[in-house]
Image (spheres, rainbow, N blue to C red):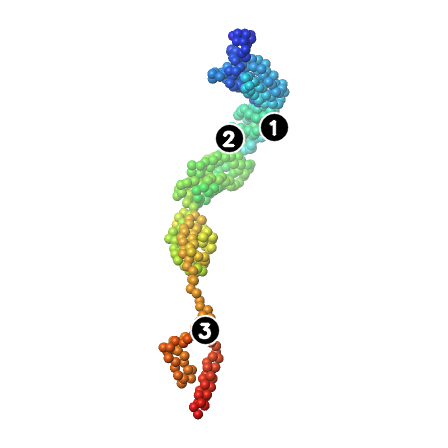
Amino acid sequence: MTGPAAKENMEYLFVGTNFMTTDSYPVLEQHVEDVDVTVGHSPLSVEDTTDVTVTLELYDGSTTTATQTSDYDVDGAVSIENRTVVPSETGTANVSVTVNGKTDTATLDVRTPANVTRTDAQLDTSAILANSTATVTARFENDGGMPGSERLSVSADGETVAEETVFVSGYADTVETVAWSVNETGTYDVTLAERHLGTLAALDRDTVECKDVSAPATVTPGETYAVEATFENTADTPVSIPVSYRSGEQSTDKRVRVTPGESIHRVEFTAAEPTGRTVTHAVTVGNSTQRAKTTVRAPAQFELGDLDGPTEVTEGETITVTATVENVGDRAGSRNVSLSIDGHERVREAVRLDGGETRRVSLDVTVEGSDAVEYKVDTGDDSEAGSITIQTDETPTPSRSEESVDSSDGPRDDSGDGPRADSTSTPDTTNQATTTTTGPGFGIVVTVLAFLGGGVLLARQH
């Protein structure tokens, strides 16, 4: 049941079946549930080889390998020899195996070999402080497709002071910095491999000092602010120095190139909670340390209270809405306090308050519409709302045609001598039009008519 003739022997014993040979024993192809093809590694160099493995999963959950006995379908410039994939040229290649209708494929990425070269190198500074570090920066390039590496070795006065292996991805470049400690003052010739990079001077630590540090007196949480340090360099050449910045629990170390004389350098920090605390900033260079302090304050926050406004007005009336505005923060600030009617801003007032300060604000607006409206006072940080009922004046105004003559005393003779009508009688006004006469000439006309009427009466008596 094993060996090169196992497949033929099993098919002879079990006529009508289809067996396949694995690396261990023959199996019925119908019992193969899945196929898995894997390669040892990819990508690989055209000069390298890798392993291939074929795993069969059987119907009962067991597995077996068929790496040696499988029929491979190869698409690409590779060959398979005794479980080993051998590429012949760069590019992509696929290795597939099919059993019982199940197929799996492994893809290989074949590349050119690595070729790493150093393209540039430099001594980062010509002067440092003793008991600090010096650095060399080098650039490496790999024009091959496979990852590669290069050894970086730095010497000072012929003594190796730093070694490092640099790894570069395929078709890529990288910049690497290597550092070493210089404890003694003096000058040193620095080389990388056989290339001379320059002369390094290690100066006394008192050559550069931190003379002063300044920082904002107050900041708010989340605010980014700068701490400025003033350095003095007594040498006649720029010096690269390590500077330690501390701000509360935050810290950062960086190298600073300080020119001869005085110069200012800055580093940024972000203020953090809680408020009300004081942060000490410390800047250390060599043997000198300077400090400054910053207090973290709560930002301006404008809150509203005691909102007061009318509950009922007449349409077109101008109302006054008042509210108390308080800056509950520690720092001074400004806000626009606005009054809106039914969501539309109608008036605003700019208000500036110191921390903890309170002010009463009054806002006037003319109310129009019917029924009820909603109003809101807003500071941008806080808001308060209320409602107003609007009443409309619907009392009618009588027209002139509807006015009537006052007849409470009845008709009267304007001459004063005529008879007075019975005040208890009610005149018949049926089908009679009521006429109102006004104007400056009305009294004169009445007097003339009365006079003529009196003359006619005397004539009749005579």
Q: Secondary structure at mark 1?
A: strand
Would you place residue 225 above or below residue 319 in this image? above
For badge 2, the amino acid type reads: Thr
Circle on res. 119: 1
Q: Is residue 189 visible?
A: no
Q: Secondary structure at mark 3?
A: loop
Q: Nearer the viewer, mark 3 or mark 1?
A: 3
Q: Which residue is mark 2?
A: 133
- N-terminal label among 1 and 2: 1
- In the drawing, does residue 14 fall left or right of residue 249? right
The residue carrying pointer 1 sits among few (fewer than 14), some (14 to 19) or many (20 or more) residues within 10 Å by Cα, namely few
Q: Which residue is mark 3?
A: 431
Q: Residue at 45% of width from left, 36% of height from top?
A: 251
For badge 1, the amino acid type reads: Thr
- N-terminal label among 3 and 1: 1
Q: Residue at 43% of width from left, 73% of height from top?
A: 430
Q: Position of residue 75 (x, y in %)?
A: 61, 20
For badge 3, the amino acid type reads: Asn
- N-terminal label among 2 and 3: 2
Q: Secondary structure at mark 2?
A: strand
Q: Position of residue 191 (x, y in %)?
A: 57, 26
Q: Quadrant of the C terminus?
A: bottom left
Label 1 and label 2: CA atoms lie apart by: 24 Å
Would you place residue 174 above or below residue 392 in this image? above
Which residue occupies the foreground of this view, 36 or 462? 462
